[in-house]
Every structure is written in structure tokens, then in C-alpha cells.
């Protein structure tokens, strides 16, 4: 699954700067139990399914479906009940037959459901002896309006309103579609049959086996038997679709499916699928095992994911799959490519080999996130992402991991809601960063050899984290690999390495002390990690495994000392003042990746008072006009992030803005508004970022130009080229007055493309003006935006008006509940308070959690409360220092 809050690398690519990735802190949380790697299950261990034969008849108009299922299973110990998982179902004709007709007539089952436990218990008059059986039942289920189980997405086309159906089962919603052993360790094969309207296309994991006319405008579509897989990977989609295909390597048919008339916009994704599949067949050393791999585009959105790796039938919301040539730019191409690379990596890591239980979810998500970066770097060198990939991946999760509310990568998951909450910044971002560090530690060949034998060994089965470590350890003899891997996956938090250099007998002696970087616990006793540290000075690099204290020696004296060269290490570096000064003086001679790393560390250490703010601010003065766009992106993001802290102090904010504009405006003037021949991808992205950040810093000229281009675009499409379109619309929406808002509203109503229409409704919720924000909130509760846009509108309002959005959602709880995926509500409401700058919000979230969130599901609420408290406290410490620096520099 790919999160809506995208990975650090995707944030960096999209031109959203590092400061913004702190938002992912809202998704970080604490596990209530110590880490464990043992698989747990919520179902009794007395039976195991092996094969499902399912037939469903959806009634899209009635938002309900009928089903029949036959499940081949093994009873493992004597029992008179079989417990399956099921939600919102009714049952009829339930019976159990012994395999091969043994035992006479089928036994009738009495079914009782437990809505809270999400189970259906099939009870029999007599004890079942261990052996093979077939359980059969008829049932009914519901079609949902959000992405849980079988769900509907409605959209407008030139031909009127359309309704398409899709399924979304991860983490625990296959039980809304089939009564089943709906946990990842109960792998089975599936035969799916669907009764559908004749004119619709029906898609599942496997190709069709047959399609026959069933009369009355209906057809019966039977799919080939799936491979052995977890329930959460089953897929069904049906609607008025088109499909385009390519022949992939090894006979695999690569397909994309979209609403009728839109499949041409999926050409880039189709080719990406072919290229990525070829790359992965090679990397994993096991060929993709299904006959086809489809990627299905769907209108609308979810608050929590953008794509899902169903085996052979990836589901992706349109905005991450289709490229409309009139509005798409290089950032959109990157999003489509990285999303496909992520989901296709799951076809091996997740689908072929699956974590035994949600404790090890990071095996799926950390790996797919790491793989998307690796593959994008390799297959699209022209996007020039090597520097940001290394620097941002290693630090993307550190914002959240530095709080008391963090958790180890491997964590205990006990409930469905906890599994849902495990899809967070630690699982994705830190997981990916640790893989990057471990690969760097053992070398890429040894790492890949370990991955290959792990995949081979566990294909079609389940695994735990240590299964992967054992294989990599075997491939990397002589390293303390398992020690390092355990330190970083079984404990939470971030090592801090303090470096101090001295010249001893003509050599540079660097002492290294391992501590812990935390944002909210300055007096915490540091945990102990074995940290692979690289130290570079004067062209020489040495490596050390640092736990506690250590030292290294390099030839010669006097050259600056740099730690974490290449930035693959998951730690922060605190230099002694003299060493930092030497690095700072020689800043422009460092490789770009290390410039990014040094700036990010200085900024993070200044934020908690370990380094003066002036160190970081001095670095922003040093970047020359012709520096890498990556570096300018970082400077712009850093300055944009500081501006926010001056809210409520217009006089000093004006002074800060004067400084920030003195740095950023000359760079923007050099780039100008228009694309130039030969502009690189990163230059185009920087131009767009600078426009957004300059407008945020109150640059009237930039805001006026954005507005005038928007006005002109009604008659001249060139006024708002694809590269700048989203940025310009963002500025126009944020600064909108009532007539402008009405104009955007009219554009939304008139728009026929579902993808563009969804964007416009999102923009309506971005206004700074309070009255307009209220209009957006009111509109979100109507049918107008579409069932899956409304929750996003309320969340958008919350970025500028967190209290207003939070209060509104709580006041309309029953209505808003229907707009959010059911297992995600415990995350959604507290998240609305995240941008608050006032401690009052902490009390409100606390009261809400006490009243509405189960005690076992409060990690998001606790995280948001902690973030607000810490932000308020740190702001009070940081602002005077920043202000003093401004004054000293004449601002
Ligand atoms: Zn994923």
C-alpha cells in the first residue's frame, strides 16, 4: 500500500520541502507493548483454509451484494465450532461436508455473528474430527462508500454519472467481502466468479477463465485460480473500463485499466510497469509468477492510501496513475513512476512472501519504499534524484522518531485498528532508511544475495524479520550485521554521534560518542546502538562501528572532518564548535548530498538547543546563485519553515521576510517564470517551489503574477503551463477572495474530468479567509464534492484553520464518520488538530479521544498532542535566537 502522506523522497521530489515532511510526525506513535516477532492471530488455531470458491453478484444500485462461498479446510484439532472473520453479513444455507463424501450428509451449521470481534461462528451439533472438510454458505454483504471491502466510486463523464466498484482489503477488510480466515498467515488459493452487467469490464488478480451470457443483460465471469496468497491481496474491479496492454518480459502481459476514454493517459504507467518488472525479475532472482499484471486507475481518493498492491491487479487512484497532458508535469510523472515501482516491489515483498503478522508490516512497506527510490534512481537518471534520495530517505522519519510517542520498527500489533495505525512514518520512512543503511553497511551485492535467498526460501509463505536477517547475515560474513539490524529495528529512536577532532602527532584523531537525539526528552538516558559511522577528512574515509565511545585516526591534520559521507547512516551528527566552523567555512566544497545532510542536522540540532540557530542560519547565507537546485530547494524550505514561527509578531516577521527574500528572490529572478530550453527536472521543480514559498513569504509581486496568470488562463492556456499550474492554483486558492472562490467553485462544477474536478474541490478548502474556509466545510457535508473528496476537504481546511476544522468535524461526527475509511477514524480526527499552535487544542483532542477512541487505538491522538506541546515549547526557545541573529545581520 502507498500512503497518502508520501515518503520523504516523494516529498522531496514533489518540491514540497523538508520542513513539510515534519507533518508525518502526526502519524508516528508508540506501541503499548515491547517488540516481539512472534506471529499472533485473533482466530482459534483449530482449522486452516486451503482454497476458496467464491461467487458474488453485486447490486451496485442497491449498494449490496449476494455471495456464495465454498471453503476447503483442514480441521487440526477436535472442535464443534469454526470461527471465521466477517463484517456486515447475513448467512443462509451454511453447511459442512467431509472431504470425498466421507461422513455422509453435510452437517448443518448454526451461525452466530459478533460485530465487535468481526467474527462469524459456525457451530455444529457434533464434534468435528481432525481432517479435510468443505464449508459452504450463502451470504449477503454491503457495498461501502469508502475504500473498505467492496466499495463504489461515482464519477461524472460526458455521458452522465457512472458508478464503478472496486475492492480494498488491506489491512483487515476481506472479511467484508468473504467470510474468511482474514489474516495474512492464512494463505489459500481463490476461484472467483462474478455475475456482472454485460457491458462492464470485470477485473481480478488472474485472467478470465471464461465469460458466458447469463441472460437479462448479465454475464458470468469466471477467473483462473489464484496462486496461494493472503486474503488481503484479493481484488475485484468492475465498471465501464478500457484496458491497454504491452508484452512484458518473460511472457507477462502488462495492463492498465481506466474509465472509458482515459486509458491513453495511462501510457506512461504502462511503460513504467514493463520497465520496472524487467528490473525486478533480475533483482529478486525469481520471475514474476502470474500471467498478467494490471494496474487499475480509479477516480476519487482515500485519506490514507494512494495505491494497493493486490497481486496481479494493482489498484491506484487516478491522480497517481493517469497523466493528463494538459496538466501533468515532471513531478506528476515521478509520482506515477514511484507509485508503480512501490506497488510492483510488493508483488515480491508482500505478495509472494508475506509477513506472518502485522508486527512485521515494515518488511512489506519499508522494503517497497526503499525499492521505489532505488529503482527510480536507476531507471530515471535524468530526474537527478540521487542526492535527495540519500539525504531525505535517511532523515525522513527522524522528525517523528525523536518523540516519546515513537515505536520500534518491529512492534506488537493486537487489534485491527492498531494494524491500520502501523501504516505510519516509522514503518515506511524509517524502515526504508534502515534498509538503505544496512545495504550500505554490508554492500549492495551481499544485500541482494541475502534478499534473493530470502525470497526463494519463503515464496508463497510467510516470514518474520529475522528470516531476512539470517539470509543477509549469511551473505555478509565477518560483519556484526544481526547486531546492527536488531539495534535499529527492535528499539525506537535516533542515535546522536558527537564528533570532536584533534591533531595528534601529525594525524587527525576523531573521538566519537554515541548518544541519542530526542526532541521532547532532553534528559533521557540514551539507548545503545551499534552505529556504522563513516568519517572523511582530506580525501580519506574510515569506517567504525560506534556503540558508546570510539575513536578513529586519519592521515594528516587541518582538513575539515565530515561524518556520514553519502548520508546513508540513520543518525544525527553533532560536531564540536571548531569542527562545525571548519565544515561551514568549506561548505561549498562539500558534495551536494553532504551539504543537504549537514544542513538538515544543523537545523534539527538547533531546534532542540544542541547547536546555535546561528550555525544553521549562517549556512543559508553561503549558498551561491549557481549552487545545485537541490540545495536551493533546501534553503527555500528551511526559510519557509521558519517564517511560520513568527506568526503573531508582524514586525519581526517582516524583518525575517526581508532576509529570506534577499536570499530567494535573486535565485527566482535568475530562473524566471518561463521554462527555458534545457531546464533540468530539478530546475523546473525548484522554480515551482520558489514561487510557492515566495508567495508564502508575502512576496506581493509573485502573488499578483500568479493571480494574473490564473485570470489569463481562461483564454490562454499558456499562462498556466503544466509545470506551474498546481502552484499557481494553490496560491490563487489560498489567497482567494469571495469572487475568486466562486470562480474556482464554478470551474469545479463544470469540470468533466474526474481527476481535475477532484483537484478543484481540494483547492476550495485551501482558503486563508475564514468565511471561505467555513463555506468549504459546509460544502464537504453535501453530496456535491463526491463521497471520497469530503474528508480531504476538511483536512485541507485544518492546515490553516485547525481549530475550526476540528470543532466542525466533532460537531458533525455522525456525518463525518461516513466520509472516512472505517478503520482510519482514530487517526483522522486527531490529525485535524495537528497544525494547531495553541495548547487549547491538546485539551480538545484529549477530550475527544477519551470519548470516542478505544484506549488501544490512541497512538495518533497521543502523538498529535505531544507534537503540539513540543512545538509550542521549542518555538519559545528558538525564536529569540533567530531574532538575535537577524538583528546582528542588520534585519
Ligand atoms: Zn506499500
Image: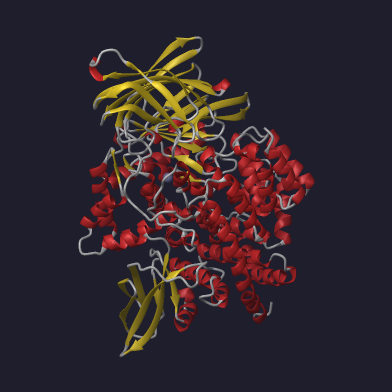
Give percent across and percent down for residue 336: 48, 44
Q: Is residue 48 above or below residue 530?
A: above
Q: Colour scheme of this structure image?
A: secondary structure
Is residue 218 in view from this perspective? yes
In-front residue for pair 671/490: 490
Task: Tell me: 750 left or right of 823.
Answer: right
Task: Tell me: 777 left or right of 7.
Answer: right
Quarter of image, ligand 1:
top left
What residue appears at the point 37 percent right and 24 percent down from the top-left corner? 123
Q: Residue furthest bottom?
A: 505
Q: Is residue 440 above or below residue 313?
A: below
Give percent across and percent down for residue 830: 59, 50
Give percent across and percent down for residue 16: 56, 56
**In which image quadrant can residue 337 be found?**
top left
Task: Tell me: 327 left or right of 85.
Answer: right
In-front residue for pair 736/55: 55
How many numbered circles does the render carry?
0
Is residue 208 in view from this perspective? no
What residue appears at the point 40 percent right and 78 percent down from the top-left corner? 499
Q: Is residue 263 above or below residue 826?
A: above
**In which image quadrant can residue 312 be found?**
top left
What residue appears at the point 38 percent right and 48 percent down from the top-left corner? 359
In-front residue for pair 284/865: 865
Q: Quadrant of the C terminus?
A: bottom right
In-front residue for pair 4/296: 4
Give percent across and percent down for residue 831: 58, 51
Q: Residue furthest right?
A: 739
What residue appears at the point 73 percent right and 37 percent down from the top-left corner? 746
Amino acid at each position: 500500500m502507498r500512503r497518502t502522506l508520501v515518503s520523504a523522497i516523494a516529498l522531496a521530489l514533489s518540491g514540497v520541502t523538508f520542513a513539510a515532511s515534519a507533518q508525518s510526525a502526526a502519524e508516528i506513535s508508540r506501541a503499548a507493548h515491547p517488540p516481539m516477532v512472534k506471529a499472533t492471530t485473533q482466530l482459534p488455531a483449530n482449522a486452516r483454509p486451503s482454497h476458496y470458491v467464491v461467487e458474488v453478484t453485486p447490486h451496485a444500485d442497491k449498494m449490496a451484494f449476494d455471495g456464495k462461498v465454498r471453503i476447503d479446510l483442514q480441521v487440526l484439532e477436535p472442535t464443534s465450532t469454526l470461527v471465521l472473520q466477517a463484517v456486515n453479513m447475513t448467512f443462509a444455507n451454511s453447511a459442512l461436508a467431509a472431504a470425498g463424501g466421507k461422513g455422509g450428509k453435510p452437517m448443518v451449521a448454526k451461525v452466530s455473528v459478533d460485530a465487535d470481534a468481526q467474527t462469524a461462528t459456525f457451530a455444529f451439533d457434533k464434534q468435528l474430527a481432525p481432517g479435510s472438510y468443505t464449508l459452504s454458505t450463502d451470504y449477503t454483504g454491503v457495498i461501502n462508500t469508502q475504500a473498505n471491502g467492496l466499495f463504489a466510486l461515482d464519477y461524472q463523464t460526458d455521458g452522465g454519472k457512472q458508478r464503478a466498484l472496486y475492492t480494498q482489503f488491506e489491512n483487515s477488510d476481506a472479511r467484508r467481502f468473504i467470510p474468511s480466515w482474514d489474516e495474512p498467515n492464512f494463505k489459500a488459493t481463490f476461484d472467483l466468479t462474478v455475475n456482472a452487467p454485460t457491458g462492464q469490464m470485470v477485473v481480478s488478480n488472474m485472467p478470465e477463465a471464461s465469460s458466458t451470457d447469463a441472460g437479462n443483460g448479465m454475464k458470468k465471469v469466471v477467473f483462473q485460480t489464484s496462486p496461494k496468497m493472503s486474503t488481503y491481496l484479493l481484488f475485484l474491479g468492475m465498471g465501464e473500463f478500457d484496458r491497454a496492454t504491452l508484452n512484458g518480459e518473460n511472457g507477462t502481459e502488462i495492463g492498465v485499466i481506466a474509465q472509458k476514454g482515459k486509458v491513453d493517459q495511462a501510457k506512461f504507467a504502462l511503460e513504467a510497469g514493463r520497465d520496472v518488472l524487467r528490473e525486478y525479475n533480475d533483482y529478486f532472482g525469481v520471475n514474476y509468477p502470474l500471467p498478467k499484471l494490471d494496474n487499475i486507475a480509479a477516480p476519487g481518493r482515500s485519506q490514507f492510501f494512494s495505491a494497493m498492491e493486490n497481486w496481479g491487479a494493482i489498484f491506484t487512484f487516478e491522480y497517481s496513475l493517469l497523466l493528463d497532458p494538459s496538466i501533468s508535469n515532471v513531478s506528476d510523472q515521478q509520482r506515477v513512476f514511484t507509485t508503480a515501482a512501490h506497488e510492483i516491489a510488493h508483488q515480491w515483498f508482500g505478495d509472494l512472501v508475506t509477513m506472518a503478522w502485522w508486527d512485521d508490516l515494515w518488511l512489506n512497506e519499508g522494503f517497497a519504499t526503499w525499492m521505489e527510490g532505488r529503482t527510480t534512481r536507476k531507471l530515471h537518471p535524468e530526474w537527478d534524484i540521487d542526492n535527495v534520495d540519500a539525504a531525505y530517505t535517511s532523515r525522513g522519519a527522524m522528525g517523528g522518531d525523536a518523540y516519546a510517542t515513537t515505536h520500534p520498527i518491529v512492534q506488537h500489533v493486537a487489534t485491527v485498528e492498531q494494524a491500520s495505525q502501523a501504516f505510519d512514518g516509522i514503518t515506511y520512512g524509517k524502515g526504508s532508511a534502515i534498509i538503505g543503511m544496512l545495504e550500505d553497511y554490508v554492500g549492495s551485492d551481499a544485500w541482494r544475495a541475502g534478499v534473493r535467498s530470502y525470497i526463494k526460501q519463503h515464496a508463497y509463505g510467510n516470514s518474520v524479520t529475522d528470516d531476512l536477517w539470517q539470509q543477509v547475515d549469511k551473505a555478509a560474513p565477518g560483519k556484526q550485521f544481526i547486531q546492527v539490524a536488531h539495534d535499529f529495528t527492535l528499539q525506537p529512536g535516533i542515535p546522536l554521534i558527537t564528533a570532536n577532532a584533534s591533531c595528534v602527532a601529525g594525524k587527525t584523531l576523531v573521538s566519537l560518542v554515541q548518544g541519542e537525539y530526542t526532541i521532547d526528552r532532553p534528559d533521557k538516558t540514551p539507548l545503545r546502538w551499534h552505529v556504522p559511522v563513516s568519517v572523511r577528512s582530506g580525501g580519506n574515509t574510515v569506517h567504525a562501528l560506534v556503540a558508546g565511545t570510539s575513536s578513529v585516526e586519519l592521515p594528516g591534520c587541518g582538513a575539515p572532518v565530515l561524518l556520514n559521507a553519502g548520508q546513508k547512516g540513520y543518525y544525527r551528527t553533532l560536531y564540536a564548535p571548531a569542527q562545525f566552523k571548519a565544515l561551514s567555512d568549506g561548505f561549498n566544497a562539500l558534495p551536494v548530498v553532504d551539504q543537504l545532510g549537514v544542513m538538515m542536522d544543523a537545523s534539527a540540532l538547533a531546534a532542540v538547543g544542541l547547536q546555535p540557530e546561528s550555525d544553521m542560519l549562517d549556512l543559508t547565507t553561503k549558498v551561491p546563485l549557481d549552487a545545485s537546485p537541490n540545495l536551493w530547494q533546501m534553503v527555500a524550505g528551511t526559510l519557509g519553515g521558519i517564517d511560520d514561527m513568527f506568526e503573531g509578531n508582524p514586525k519581526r516577521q517582516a524583518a525575517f521576510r526581508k532576509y529570506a527574500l534577499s536570499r530567494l528572490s535573486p535565485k527566482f529572478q535568475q530562473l524566471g517564470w518561463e521554462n527555458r530550453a534545457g531546464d533540468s527536472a530539478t530546475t523546473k521543480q525548484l522554480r515551482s517551489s520558489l514561487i510557492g514559498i515566495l508567495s508564502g513569504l508575502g512576496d506581493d509581486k509573485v502573488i499578483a503574477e500568479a493571480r494574473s496568470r490564473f485570470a489569463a488562463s481562461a483564454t490562454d492556456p499558456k499562462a498556466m503551463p503544466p509545470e506551474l499550474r498546481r502552484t499557481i492554483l494553490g496560491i490563487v486558492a489560498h489567497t482567494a477572495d469571495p469572487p475568486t472562490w466562486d470562480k474556482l467553485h464554478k470551474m469545479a462544477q463544470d469540470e468533466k474530468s474526474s481527476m481535475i474536478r477532484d483537484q478543484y474541490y481540494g483547492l476550495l478548502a485551501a482558503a486563508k479567509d475564514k468565511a471561505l474556509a467555513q463555506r468549504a466545510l459546509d460544502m464537504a457535508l453535501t453530496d456535491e464534492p463526491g463521497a471520497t473528496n469530503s474528508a480531504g476537504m476538511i483536512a485541507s481546511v485544518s492546515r490553516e484553520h485547525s481549530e475550526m476544522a476540528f470543532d466542525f468535524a466533532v460537531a458533525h461526527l455522525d456525518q463525518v464518520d461516513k466520509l472516512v475509511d472505517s478503520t482510519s477514524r482514530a487517526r483522522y480526527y486527531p490529525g485535524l488538530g495537528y497544525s494547531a499552535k495553541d495548547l487549547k487544542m491538546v485539551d480538545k483532542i484529549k477530550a475527544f479521544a477519551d470519548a470516542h477512541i478505544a484506549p488501544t487505538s490512541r497512538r495518533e491522538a497521543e502523538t498529535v498532542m505531544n507534537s503540539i506541546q513540543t512545538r509550542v515549547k521549542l518555538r519559545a526557545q528558538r525564536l529569540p535566537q533567530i531574532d538575535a541573529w537577524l538583528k546582528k545581520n542588520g534585519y
